[in-house]
Amino acid sequence: IIKIGRSKDVERRRHDLQTCHPFRIITIASFPGHGHLEGVVHAALSASRVDGPGREWFRVSASDAMHAIAIAMR
């Protein structure tokens, strides 16, 4: 499961998420200055959204997530 979100402090956000989830959270990539594309990426991956609390979790491979981000950045 991949979380796609934005934060001013990625490492702090990762740490905060880690304290309330029973699984290990790692940062795969960060794209400073591109937070405005979050909604575009979420829309592109909407069919893979994980049900439950929060709207930023997707059941996709890291490769598919990176592909959606690359397309949004074009």
Image (tube, rainbow, N blue to C red):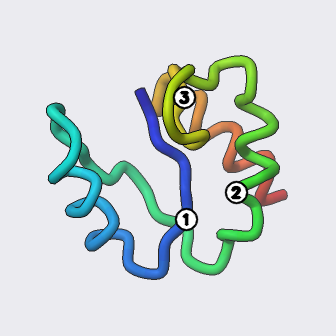
The x and y percentages for residue 60 are 53, 22
How far, Cα to Cα, is label 2 from label 3? 13 Å
Residue 32 in the image, given as x and y percentages of width and height:
55, 77
Indicate whether 36 appears above or below 8.
above
Vertical relation: 21 (above or below) 31: above
Along the line of sight, the residue nearer the viewer: 33 or 70: 33
Where disc 3 sits, the SS reads strand
**Label 1 Cα crowd, 10 Å radius (few <14 / some 14-19 / many 20+):** some
> Label 3 is placed on what type of residue?
Phe
Q: Of the residues shown, which amino acid type is indicated by label 2?
A: Glu
Q: Which residue is mark 3?
A: 58
Please provide percent x and percent y for residue 48.
Answer: 64, 19
Residue that label 1 marks: 6
Element type at mark 1: loop
Q: Are marks 3 and 1 in contact (CB under 8 Å)?
A: no
Q: Residue at x 55, y 65 (%)?
A: 6
Q: Earlier in the sequence, mark 3 or mark 1?
A: 1
The amino acid type found where label 1 is placed reads: Arg
Query: Mark 2: few, some, or many residues within 10 Å (few <14, many ≥20)?
Result: some
Q: Residue at x 74, y 28 (%)?
A: 46
| Image mark count | 3
Q: Determine which residue is flagged by label 2.
A: 38
Q: Residue at x 70, y 56 (%)?
A: 38
